Amino acid sequence: MKYKSIFLYFIFFILLVCTGINIYKHQHILKPQILQGLPRTSISTGILDENGDPIKEMPSISYGNSYSFCIRLNSRNDKSLYLIILEDYEQSKFSTDRNEEKKCIHTIDLQKDRETRIKVTITPTKKGTIIIEPMIIDIYDYPYDPATNMAYTAGRFMNLPALSLEVKSDE
Amino acid sequence: MNKGTFLTKYKDLIVLALCVSLVIVNLFIGIISRHPPQEFPRLNNTVASSLSNDLYYRAYWKIPHIKKGKELYFYYHIANYTDTTKTIRVSVFIDYQQQLCKIGGEWKKVHLYTIEPGEYKKIPITLKCEIPGEHELFVWSRLRSYEESPKSSSNLFYDNSSIAKTPKVKIIVKE
């Protein structure tokens, strides 16, 4: 009877060790479920015209000219974000009122509980009715798993409304 | 029967029950760790799968280290588990910048694909990276065109919440 108990305890111990090793080995699979609980930045967004007023009708410009609009952002935390702009599904270069260099990606710093307005200027490369789609990317620290050489997310891509813009031909 | 007597009397049974539960936990881990699923070949450096908007996608990573200017090949796996034909737009991003990539012989930033219901596609992608150093790469698919997206009452704005992304993969470009 005593040996039976010792045997059972031994099996239990072995299983406990095996479970520990198993969890350690496969923690990269279990991790996303754990990481989903990470606090996220709460950000509200909106698009306005360059003067900060609501856009009521489809804006139009002549081909070769620039178009400016405002992005309104509110955050509950101090936060740095990436801003990208897509023009008919393709990433395009743009400048902001904080950085006049034309780049594909701009970093934006948000302050806690304070509305941030960023004026974005783009020069469309296509004619006709195009869709301008601003995107905010919230990068939070998902670690790379050395076993798989990957991080479980590419960041949180936040939706801003995509805006129609008419680019008139010069003719 | 007090608590102490109960534990003494049934201690073997309790340990046995704990053993059984540990076996179940191990089996559970074994089942969920069987990635990639059986229909996908198992390769080293596999990017984990994600589920998004009924489309299941997976990218395989063969060569995380490449030489500057050399082409990098990998597969992007996507399956349509919905009842409708999906038109997707596939793009590759390095350091959050959309890249020219070759799919089906064409170098473009956005590649259009149609996937029938129940269809699984293994899309070969070719990429070039000229900047040495460590980079982050991911693939995204637009699952919905702007025309299919809901519009605002003013018809000026589109809801664009229709992107499925793979996890980020670290790549190293050597001189």
Image: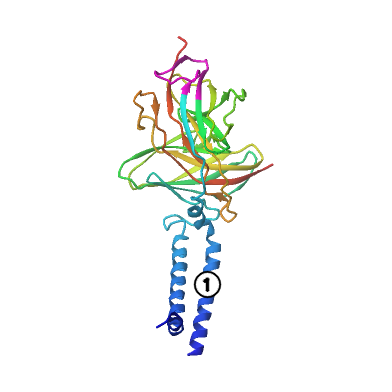
Could you tell me which chain the residue with mark 1 belongs to? Answer: A
- Which of the 4 image quadrants contains residue A121? top right
Color scheme of the displayed model: rainbow
Please report the residue visible at 55 percent of the width from the left and 71 percent of the height from the top: A17
Report which residue position mark 1 lands on.
A16
Number of labelled discs? 1
Instruction: Pick whichever, A15 or A73, lies toward us.
Output: A73
- Magenta residues span A48-70
- Which part of the image, by quadrant, shows the C terminus of chain B? top right
- A61, above or below B10, in the image: above
Please report the residue visible at 53 percent of the width from the left and 17 percent of the height from the top: A66
Instruction: Pick whichever, B4 or B53, lies toward us.
Output: B4
Residue A144 visible in this rendered orientation of the protein: yes
Image location (x, y in percent) of residue B9: 43, 85
Image location (x, y in percent) of residue B79: 39, 47
- B145, above or below B34, in the image: above
Image location (x, y in percent) of residue A149: 58, 51
Residue B98 is covered by the magenta coloring: no
Image location (x, y in percent) of residue A129: 41, 20
Q: Looking at the picture, which amino acid does disc 1 mark?
A: Leu
Residue A55 is covered by the magenta coloring: yes
- Residue at disc 1, secondary structure: helix
Residue furthest to the front in view is B2
Instruction: Pick whichever, B142 or A101, lies toward us.
Output: A101
Please report the residue visible at 47 percent of the width from the left and 15 percent of the height from the top: A61
Dominant SS in magenta: loop
